[in-house]
Amino acid sequence: MTTRGVDLDKLKFGSLISELRQEHATLNKTWTRKMLGEKTGLGKNIIDNIESGKKAQIEPETLHKLCDALDLSFLERKELFMAAAGLDGRFPVDDNPQKYLDELEDVLMKIRVPAFIIDPYGDVIALNPLILAFYQTSKEQLDKSELLSRYNMMRLLFSPEFSLHRSLMGKSWYSFAHQTIHIFRAMNLRYRTSPYFKKLVTEMSVEYPLFLSYWQGSPFIQRDQNHFMDNSRFSYQLFNINFEVISSTITSATPEGELLLYSFIPLTSEASWAFDKLLKIVGTGLIRLSLWPKNGYNMPE
């Protein structure tokens, strides 16, 4: 689709490049189109045309140069290439997005390890009782907050109220936080220009200072540029025993963007024993949290 000679898909992509450039402006005080043009070797005129949606064709070499200049990780690069191809996370597979959520929720109710369903913003759509017990929280505690991010996975990771959970992960929390932010940045890359995401990140940056330091600091980017895995591995302490866990992901494409089912898989016999004991205490089930779809807020402008 075009308007006044501008391809709307290219305009969306240009807005995304502008948003990523401005993220660098936050980090480095200033990051103009001219500076991005110099770092990529593309020149200011080409950056102008990309951001305004006037460049008809964006070559793979140009995309690689943009990825290098913007310090994108491997997973973020994959998302940027999809955005350049005009894929915004929606797939015309069915007119009824609820069908795909129902399928994931059916799996969630049967999973016998801590698990939850999130959208590309990291908002938890549904979870099982095991994950609440794992984080030593409750739906009532999550409901108490009136913040936009009250059901976001970043709250569970970075909010001051969950400091006990962080301490139970010991030193592995720092690596887990880096890996989770790495995954979070990749999964929301195509949604960075949406009003909802901008509100969400602004709020979390104020409410969770630890989140802001990881979101902006990005000391992990260089290390993770060749990191291909979209999971996180960490240690934990439960029932006075230490064990290792790794996250696993199932992705479902829907007409309203992707949904992801995350589960924590035990890597040791101690972890299996702890999860089995937790299961006997709380059982399986389904608890719904954040609304989905987000009634027009979930797509980029």
Image (cartoon, grey):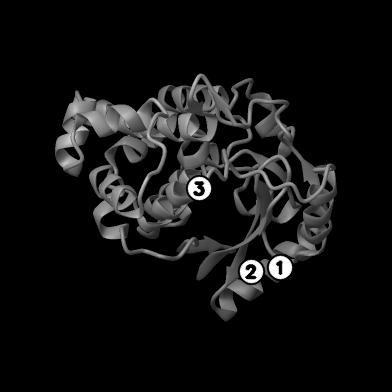
Question: Of the residues shown, which amino acid type is indicated by label 1?
Answer: Lys
Label 1 sits on a secondary structure element that is helix
Furthest residue toward bottom: 269
Rendered image quadrant of residue 171: bottom left
Question: Of the residues shown, which amino acid type is indicated by label 3?
Answer: Ala
The residue carrying mark 3 is 85
Label 3 sits on a secondary structure element that is loop
Furthest residue toward front: 5
Q: Position of residue 290 (x, y in %)?
A: 71, 34
Whether the residues at callouts 2 and 3 have beta carbons within 8 Å, the answer is no
- Let me know if residue 92 appears in the view: yes
Q: Position of residue 113 (x, y in %)?
A: 69, 64
Q: What's the CA distance linking mark 2 and mark 1?
A: 5 Å
Q: Height in image: 32 above or below 96?
A: above
Name the residue rendered at 50%, 47% in the picture. Answer: 85
Name the residue rendered at 47%, 61% in the picture. Answer: 232
Name the residue rendered at 44%, 51% in the picture. Answer: 81
- Let me know if residue 22 appears in the view: no
Q: Nearer the viewer, residue 137 or 216?
A: 216
